Image (tube, rainbow, N blue to C red):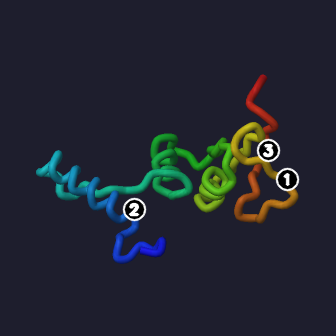
């Protein structure tokens, strides 16, 4: 096939359909149940944190610019990037969308 995939749906589409089919089978009296992606940077996970905390006065602490920091910025909350995690960056070279509010060298006391 020359390395090309033809007429194959994206993994997310297949996964979503499969999860919704499983929900319908497990909860036949709940047709309202739908799959919602909760991973960062999707707003649903930040919305759930807001509902549980009752305040927007929160900080997303993470080690990834594209998920943790960007997700927090898009949701309108502060973020703290931990320097000992995945992201190994020079903060002066980060674009505004992924600029953390705070930078923590590490999490040790």
- 7 or 69: nearer the viewer: 7
Q: Quadrant location of the C terminus?
A: top right
Q: Which residue is denoted by mark 1 in the rendering?
A: 90
Q: In this view, does 51 lie to the left or right of 72?
A: left
Secondary structure of the residue carrying numbered label 3: strand
The answer to which image quadrant residue 74 occupies is: bottom right
Q: Label 1 crowding class (10 Å Cα cut-off): few <14, some 14-19, many 20+? A: few
Using residue 78 as the reference point, say whether residue 23 is left or right of it: left
| Residue 39 left/right relative to 6 | right
Nearer to the camera, 20 or 54: 20
How far is mark 2 from mark 3, CA to CA?
Answer: 33 Å
Which comes sooner in the sequence, label 2 or label 3?
2
* Image mark for residue 108: none
> In the rendered image, which residue does mark 3 sit on?
103
Q: In this view, does 15 lie above or below 62?
A: below
Could you say where residue 3 lies in the image, as x and y percent from the top left?
A: 48, 71
Residue lying at 58% horizontally and 58% vertically, measured from the top left: 75
Marks 2/3 in contact by CB < 8 Å: the verdict is no
* Residue located 77% across and 33% down the image: 106
Give neighbour class at mark 2: few <14, some 14-19, many 20+ (Cα, 10 Å): few
The residue located at (65%, 44%) in the rendering is: 59
Closer to us: mark 1 or mark 3? 1
Mark 1–mark 2 Cα distance, whole angstroms, equals 33 Å
Q: Name the residue under label 2.
A: 12
Judged from this view, the residue extending furthest toward the right is 92
């Amino acid at each position: 096939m020359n390395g090309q995939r033809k007429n194959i749906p994206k993994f997310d589409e297949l996964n979503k359909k499969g999860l919704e089919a499983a929900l319908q089978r497990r909860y036949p009296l709940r047709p309202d149940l739908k799959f919602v992606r909760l991973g960062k940077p999707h707003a649903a996970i930040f919305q759930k944190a807001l509902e549980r905390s009752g305040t927007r006065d929160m900080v997303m602490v993470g080690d990834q610019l594209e998920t943790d920091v960007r997700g927090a910025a898009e949701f309108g909350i502060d973020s703290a990037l931990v320097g000992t995690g995945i992201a190994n960056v020079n903060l002066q070279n980060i674009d505004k969308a992924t600029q953390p509010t705070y930078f923590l060298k590490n999490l040790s006391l």
